[in-house]
């Protein structure tokens, strides 16, 4: 009688979880990958969906399709609510248990509102495909509502867009909103024009893109302002409500606010009864295992770990992929009986951010790029990370079309037909 295969459970189908599953291809193990969504979204390009540059199918792919050739992987679409460490089982929302011999926790991050969770209803963030389509609808419906609005002050509020946080997501979103607004308003509306558009980027620090070198931050700031973005630096947000945002000693009237200021880890630390850092990330050993539980490996945004130089490993896609691959390597080594130390070593490839259709900044450490050359490098790098050849071709063609014509093919509003209610009252419905 053959012994049962070791059971490997992976929670999360993002970069880290998928990398772990794919590295276990062909291994004599039984893998269960659990995710509450059926798809894996390419988070670095979600804002492209929000700005109507790419359709949802171009920034997300079914997890089952990605892993279809791996016979040793079962995909479960379910919501995890806990982990029974003593019984070595993952607890699902319906009360069922999925037993494991080795557990990989790759649950990612969620929006953080610094203790002001009530702000989320007025200022959605951008982490999921649903977030991207919802924000896109908010933007497009604001244009529609402004076209009908006869009150000048109310129209100004509808055409004012606030983005909170000037990291890569906030910078990219600010440029994207400007370009979407100009493309949508030009020649297509009669009562509003591109000149009516106002985009305000609010940052609590004294410069944009804090992770980049000061010279690239300065270049980005100038590029944003040249693009027409109003950048407010050193301004902490004090309040957000249905009518606008208060920051510093200022009040901005707006109906559309996008949150890009911070993230927090998933509830994984509570599931594991583990020590966590201020952001809720699980403090792990050098090999990414949970202290006292070598059978549990925590990767990606869920883990708190530093480089040998003492710097925190950033919450970016390459880091998650490297951690997921390391988790699989560690599992296979331990199953072979190899107990030698295997610390995780993160190789930082660089920081990238796009500012607009023809401008970006890239910081490789010793090498820095900016402008249109950086934009092309940024595009090639992101296309490389897409799942398959078909998506790479589609995204490349979409970007090339937008680059040459400025036109977007995804400016559709779903569930947005006119009713007795103001259009913006419907934005929370599924798009």
Image: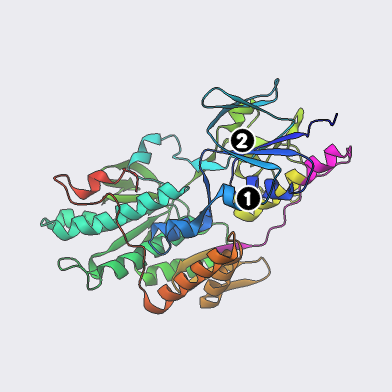
Foreground tag (2 vs 1): 1
Asked if residue 330 is among those painted magenta in the image, a careful observer would answer yes
Where does the image place residue 332, in percent across and percent down from the top left? Answer: 81, 42
Q: Residue at x 77, y 41 (%)?
A: 287
In the rendered structure, which segment of residues is drawn in magenta? 329-352
Q: Is residue 19 above or below residue 92?
A: below
Count of residue discs: 2
Write down the residue under mark 2.
Answer: 277
For this orientation, the residue located farthest to the front is 1
Residue sitting farthest toward the left: 150
Identify the residue shown where x is 58% and y is 24%.
96
**Coloration of the structure image:** rainbow
Secondary structure of the magenta portion, mostly?
loop
Q: Element under label 2?
A: loop
Visible in this render: residue 258? yes
Q: Which residue is mark 1?
A: 68
Residue 362: horizontal and vertical position, in percent? 58, 67
Is 97 magenta? The answer is: no
Which of 16 and 352 lies nearest the eye of the viewer?
16
Label drawn at residue 256 = none
Measured as percent of width and height from the top left, residue 167 is found at: 49, 55
The answer to whether one can see residue 207 in this image is: no
Q: Is residue 6 left or right of residue 163?
A: right
Horizontal placement of 205 versus 160: left or right? right
In the image, taking residue 422 as reference, residue 95 lies left or right, namely: right
Q: Quadrant of the N terminus?
A: top right
């Amino acid at each position: 009688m053959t012994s049962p295969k070791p059971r490997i459970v992976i929670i999360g189908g993002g970069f880290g979880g998928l990398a772990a599953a794919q590295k276990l291809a062909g291994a004599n193990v039984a893998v269960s990958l659990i995710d509450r969504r059926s798809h894996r979204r390419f988070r670095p390009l979600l804002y492209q969906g929000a700005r109507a540059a790419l359709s949802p199918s171009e920034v997300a792919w079914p997890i089952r399709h990605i892993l279809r050739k791996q016979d040793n992987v079962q995909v479960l679409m379910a919501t995890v609510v806990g982990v029974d460490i003593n019984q070595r089982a993952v607890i699902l929302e319906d009360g069922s248990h999925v037993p494991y011999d080795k557990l990989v926790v790759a649950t990612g991050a969620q929006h953080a509102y610094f203790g002001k969770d009530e702000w989320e209803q007025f200022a959605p963030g951008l982490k999921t495909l649903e977030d991207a389509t919802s924000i896109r609808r908010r933007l497009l419906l604001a244009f529609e509502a402004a076209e009908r609005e006869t009150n000048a002050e109310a129209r100004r509020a509808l055409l004012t867009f606030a983005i909170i946080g000037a990291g890569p997501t906030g910078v990219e979103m600010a440029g994207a909103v400007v370009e979407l607004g100009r493309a949508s308003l030009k020649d297509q509306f009669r009562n509003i024009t591109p000149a009516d558009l106002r985009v305000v980027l609010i940052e609590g620090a004294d410069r944009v893109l804090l992770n980049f070198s000061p010279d690239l931050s300065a270049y980005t700031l100038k590029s944003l302002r040249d693009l027409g973005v109003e950048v407010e630096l050193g301004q902490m947000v004090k309040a957000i409500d249905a009518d606008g945002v208060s920051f510093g000693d200022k009040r901005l009237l707006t109906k559309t606010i996008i949150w890009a200021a911070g993230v927090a880890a998933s509830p994984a630390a509570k599931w594991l009864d583990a020590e966590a850092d201020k952001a809720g990330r699980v403090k792990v050993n050098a090999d990414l295992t949970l202290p006292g539980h070598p059978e549990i490996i925590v990767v990606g945004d869920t883990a708190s770990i530093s480089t040998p130089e003492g710097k925190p490993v950033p919450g970016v896609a390459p880091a998650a992929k490297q951690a997921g691959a390391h988790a699989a390597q560690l599992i296979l080594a331990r199953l072979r009986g190899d107990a030698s130390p295997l610390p995780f070593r993160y190789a930082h490839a660089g920081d990238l951010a796009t500012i607009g259709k023809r401008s970006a900044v890239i910081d490789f450490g010793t090498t820095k790029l900016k402008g249109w050359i950086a934009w092309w490098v940024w595009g090639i790098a992101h296309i490389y990370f897409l799942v398959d050849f078909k998506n790479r071709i589609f995204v490349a063609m979409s970007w090339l079309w937008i680059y040459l014509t400025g036109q977007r093919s995804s400016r559709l509003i779903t569930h947005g037909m006119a009713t007795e209610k103001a259009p913006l009252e419907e934005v929370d419905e599924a798009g």
